[in-house]
């Protein structure tokens, strides 16, 4: 009786240690995956909120600017466009740039012009595309559009530094993925090593390979689901902590993104545990009785 209890305790210990090992690996993979996807999400949100100002001369009235706004908003390269009057532009300047500015300093005249603000789709957020769009708009609204205002360095930073960082993180995630597969595979093989005599005994009494595999595969599925849930909860906890320390992390993720990471962690956990269990079982099923020792 005590021997059976000891065997059960050993199986339980192996089961728990396997889950702990898988959880730690999935947690690291989940954090790196979230960071890479979150950084890409942040990049896309910043791209599609960056404003390019189209300044029109005073001869263009409000009705014409409303039509121009609609035309620009329907362009394939824009994610949005809206009209801003000179007075609205001055209010924005006061709020965001210099609250102490006074029109009396410049003879009571508003130095800002009426303009249409355009935002781009992420596919067109590069300096070459912006130059092409600028030339197209100047030709289309010749005599009406005076200036297309934007900062070239913004496009250069996004197309070089940030994109390189995202690729670097994805490369790390890919390397961690291969390491995770190896670690989880070894963890499961070691856990099944303690059951090799049970497997061989079942085989000797006539159990089919499918019958022997079934409980181990179901156990592997359970391990993958439990490990994925625990690892996903740990990733969520880390995200909450980071968001409280730095608002930038709040912009890097949303519920949809987290659910994608969570689903990926669970799917990867179940897939690798089932495949590793299947391969380890195949090895033990093929072993001779003398080779078990």
Image (spheres, rainbow, N blue to C red):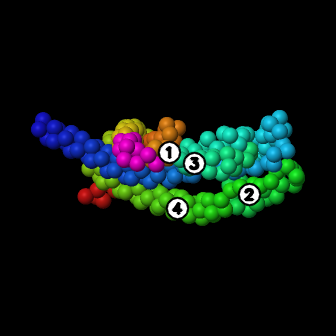
Between the C-alphas of marks 2 and 3, the distance is 32 Å
Between the C-alphas of marks 1 and 2, the distance is 25 Å
Magenta-drawn stretch contains 240: yes
Disc 1 is placed on an element classified as helix
In depth, the one of 163 and 25 nearer the eye is 163
First reached walking from the N terminus: tag 3 or tag 4: 3
Q: Main secondary structure of the magenta part?
A: helix
First reached walking from the N terminus: tag 2 or tag 3: 3
> Where is residue 212, by image quadrant?
top left
Between the C-alphas of marks 4 and 1, the distance is 17 Å
Q: How many marks?
A: 4
- Image spot of residue 289 (x, y percent): 30, 54
Q: Which residue is mark 4?
A: 165
First reached walking from the N terminus: tag 4 or tag 2: 2
Between the C-alphas of marks 3 and 4, the distance is 39 Å
Task: Name which residue lies at 12% across and 35% down.
Answer: 1
Between the C-alphas of marks 1 and 3, the distance is 31 Å
Q: Which residues are magenta?
A: 235-248
Quick one: label 3, few (<14), some, or many (20+) residues within 10 Å? few
Q: Which residue is mark 3?
A: 101
Disc 2 is placed on an element classified as helix
Q: Which residue is mark 1?
A: 251
Asked whether disc 1 touches disc 3, contact meaning CB atoms under 8 Å apart, the reply is no
């Amino acid at each position: 009786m005590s021997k059976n209890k000891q065997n059960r305790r050993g199986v339980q210990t192996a089961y728990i240690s396997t889950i702990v090992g898988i959880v730690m690996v999935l947690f690291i993979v989940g954090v790196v995956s979230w960071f890479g996807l979150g950084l890409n999400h942040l990049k896309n949100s910043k791209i599609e909120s960056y404003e390019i100002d189209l300044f029109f001369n005073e001869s263009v009235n409000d009705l014409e600017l409303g039509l121009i706004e609609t035309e620009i908003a329907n362009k394939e390269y824009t994610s949005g466009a809206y009209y801003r009057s000179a007075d609205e532009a001055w209010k924005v300047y006061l709020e965001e740039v210099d609250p102490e500015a006074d029109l009396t300093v410049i003879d009571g005249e508003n130095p800002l012009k009426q303009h249409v603000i355009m935002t781009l789709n992420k596919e067109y957020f590069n300096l070459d595309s912006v130059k092409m769009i600028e030339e197209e708009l100047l030709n289309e609204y010749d005599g009406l559009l005076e200036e297309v205002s934007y900062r070239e360095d913004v496009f250069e930073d996004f197309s070089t530094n940030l994109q390189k960082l995202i690729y670097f993180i994805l490369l790390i995630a890919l390397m961690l993925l291969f390491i995770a597969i190896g670690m989880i595979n070894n963890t499961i093989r070691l856990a099944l090593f303690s059951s090799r005599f049970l497997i061989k005994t079942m085989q000797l009494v006539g159990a089919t390979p499918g019958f022997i595999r079934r409980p181990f595969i179901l156990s592997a599925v359970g391990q993958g689901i439990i490990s994925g849930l625990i690892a996903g909860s740990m990733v969520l906890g880390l995200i909450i902590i980071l968001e409280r320390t730095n608002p930038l992390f709040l912009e890097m993720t949303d519920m949809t993104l987290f659910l994608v990471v969570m689903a990926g962690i669970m799917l990867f956990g179940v897939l690798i545990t089932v495949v590793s269990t299947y391969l380890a079982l195949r090895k033990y099923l093929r072993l001779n009785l003398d080779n078990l020792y």
